[in-house]
Image: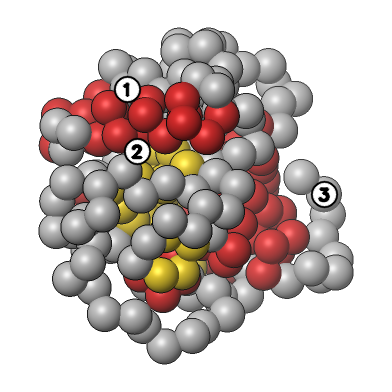
Amino acid sequence: MTAEPGTHTGREDAGSSFAPLPDRPTPELVLCAVDDLLAQAWATVADTVDGRVFVHRGSVLDVVAQAVVSPANSYGWMRGGIDAVYARAYPDVEQNVRSAVLAYHGGELPIGEAVIVPTGEAEPAWLISAPTMREPGESLPRDTVHPYLAARAVFQQWRYGSLDQGRVRDLVHTIAMPGLGTGVGGVAPASCARQVAAAWDEVFAPGRPRNGR
């Protein structure tokens, strides 16, 4: 296995049905929201960044994508919020995340890092776990930059990560992302959106001027 920081296959056959896709500068990013405030905030990201960024008003599970984002905790527990939805939909995924965190990060995945693991399904074949909080159920301060750090880790995983099957960017065409810290974490949707846009620009458009995170 080729193991870049924050990568993990978990199971060698997962995702093997996907042929490598042509090289591209960015993934297709689908920002998902089940409420109006987050959907409106996500629209500002789609309107301001360069790249294939879209908004889906509905469940992240409804999006056709090769990877979904888990705004996790540092220990890989998936018992609340969207993580609990993922755990019900993909019964093996929590154990895959926890095994990756243990194998590559000593049992605690720092905020600002991410792991990619198989879901056990044909599509989405992969889940990218990027913590927005250290402890499960943690309330984040108003000035937190954790959504930015989590989003940056996701985008770096796509751009630089590799798996047994090949580069992440060759295996993953579309990433579906829910709100990062906007649930139990209490992050305002507008703040989350600004931070995700800043992370996108840092990874995919370095040097592009912005008004800050």
On the image, the x and y values in percent for residue 117 come to: 35, 45
Which mark is nearer the camera, 2 or 1? 1
Which quadrant of the rendered structure holds the N terminus? bottom left
> What distance separates the C-alpha of mark 1 from that of mark 3?
31 Å
Q: Secondary structure at mark 2?
A: loop
Q: Which mark is residue 201?
A: none
Q: Amino acid at mark 1?
A: Met
Disc on the earlier residue, 1 or 3: 1
Q: Residue at x 67, y 53 (%)?
A: 199
Q: Secondary structure at mark 3?
A: loop
Q: Is residue 153 visible?
A: no
Q: Residue at x 27, y 27 (%)?
A: 95
Classify mark 3: residues with Cα within 10 Å, few (<14), some (14-19) or many (20+): few
Q: How is the image coloured?
A: secondary structure
Q: On screen, 111 above or below 168?
A: above
On the image, the x and y values in percent for residue 210 come to: 81, 60
| Tag 2 and tag 1, C-beta contact below 8 Å | no
Q: Which residue is mark 3?
A: 212
Q: Which mark is residue 78?
A: 1
Locate residue 17 relative to residue 105 in the image: left or right.
left
Classify mark 2: residues with Cα within 10 Å, few (<14), some (14-19) or many (20+): few
Please, which residue is most extreme toward the front here?
1
Q: On screen, 42 above or below 85?
A: below
Q: Residue at x 59, y 63 (%)?
A: 160
Q: Is residue 96 visible?
A: yes
Q: Amino acid at mark 3?
A: Gly
Q: Amino acid at mark 2?
A: Asp
Q: Nearer the viewer, residue 105 or 116?
A: 105
Q: Which residue is mark 2?
A: 35
Disc on the earlier residue, 2 or 1: 2
On the image, the x and y values in percent for residue 134 come to: 57, 17
